Image (tube, helix red, strand yellow):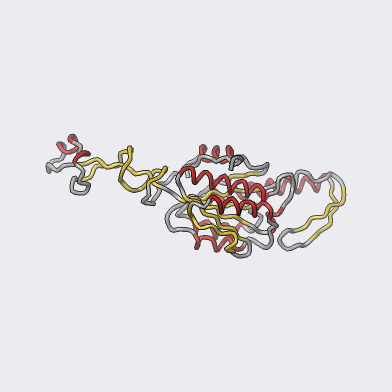
């Protein structure tokens, strides 16, 4: 826990849970942000009578100030555990995901929010599911298992995750390398439109930047185990790098068309990167 650093996050839309917390809510109650005037009969608290608003009422009714209550929210992490996430390097994708999971959970707990985790590949396994709540010990244990895991299968289980998420609006981190058909995203994100969704794109630069200029290179598809042997040359290496650049642009366009902005993490995890993401935009 000492090596895990939290990040600061915020929601652009009011939170709906009734429990007090750190985020602007839809309910009225204990708070300092003025929300509206209501008749005294609707909120019978004579301490909050607004004399000016009452005197201006032609019907001579008493009006009371009500304030916006800050509420809890729930932070979910939906993790793609398909075979393509098993890319190794100085810092593997799964190690970065493990660090992000610990940081997200600690951020939620320190803010007074709940944290839930759903991991999936071809399907959803109870092994990779933590219901929303306060389970720091369970999170630590699962994060260690994530860092050591060897992902397999496809990412088709992502389409089953909305059924496991509460209907109340939440903050969802959708974590994947997104090396799958964009039609899956266009089918998944509309099911999560009541929530604030942050797509977190985990890439490893080793996958394309450390390729040799010349030589024989074996490429293995992590999801279907198909291996290809290719002759690497400068022009071919440039095509691979250009393909990753184009893929990034395609993902940005797809996410923005669906109303969200992706967060790209490709050189290890730093909590400051996530904090800057939330400082730059409101969800």
| Image location (x, y in percent) of residue 223 | 71, 61
Q: Is residue 108 visible?
A: yes
Return the residue nearer the eye: 112 or 181: 112
Figure quadrant of the N terminus: top right
Residue at the extreme top? 52
| Image location (x, y in percent) of residue 240 | 75, 48
Q: Is residue 183 visible?
A: no
Tell me what residue is drawn at x 35 percent, y 48 percent: 26
Return the residue nearer the eye: 202 or 77: 77
Residue at the extreme front? 137
Residue 23: name its quadrant: top left
Residue 29: name its quadrant: top left
Above or below — where is 57 with respect to 79?
Answer: above
Return the residue nearer the eye: 52 or 4: 4
The answer to whether residue 206 is left or right of residue 270 is right
Above or below — where is 3 with respect to 168?
Answer: above
| Image location (x, y in percent) of residue 130 | 54, 57
Tell me what residue is drawn at x 12 percent, y 41 percent: 60
How many numbered marks, from 0 up?
Answer: 0
Tell me what residue is drawn at x 16 percent, y 38 percent: 54
């Amino acid at each position: 826990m000492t090596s895990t650093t939290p990040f600061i996050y915020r929601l652009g839309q009011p939170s709906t849970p009734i429990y007090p917390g750190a985020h602007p809510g839809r309910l009225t109650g204990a708070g300092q942000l003025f929300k509206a005037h209501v008749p005294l009969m609707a909120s019978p608290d004579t301490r909050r009578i607004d004399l000016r608003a009452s005197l201006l009422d032609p019907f001579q009714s008493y009006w009371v100030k009500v304030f916006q209550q800050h509420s809890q929210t729930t932070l979910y992490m939906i993790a793609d555990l398909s075979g393509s996430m098993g890319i190794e390097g100085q810092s593997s994708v799964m190690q970065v995901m493990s660090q992000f999971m610990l940081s997200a959970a600690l951020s939620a707990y320190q803010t007074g929010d709940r944290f839930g985790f759903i991991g999936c590949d071809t399907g959803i396994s109870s092994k990779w599911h933590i219901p929303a709540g306060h389970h720091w010990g369970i999170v630590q244990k699962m994060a260690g298992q994530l860092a050591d895991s060897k992902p397999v299968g496809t990412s088709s289980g992502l389409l089953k995750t909305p059924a496991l998420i509460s209907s109340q609006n939440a903050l969802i981190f959708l974590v994947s390398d997104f090396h799958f058909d964009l039609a899956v995203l266009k089918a998944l994100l509309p099911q999560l439109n009541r929530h604030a969704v942050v797509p977190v794109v985990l890439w490893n630069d080793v996958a394309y930047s450390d390729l040799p200029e010349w030589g024989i290179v074996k490429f293995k598809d992590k999801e279907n185990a198909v291996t290809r042997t290719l002759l690497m040359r400068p022009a071919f290496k440039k095509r691979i790098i250009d393909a990753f650049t184009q893929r990034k642009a395609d993902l940005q366009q797809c996410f923005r068309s669906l109303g969200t902005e992706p967060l790209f993490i490709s050189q290890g995890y730093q909590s400051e990167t996530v904090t800057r993401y939330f400082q730059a935009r409101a969800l």
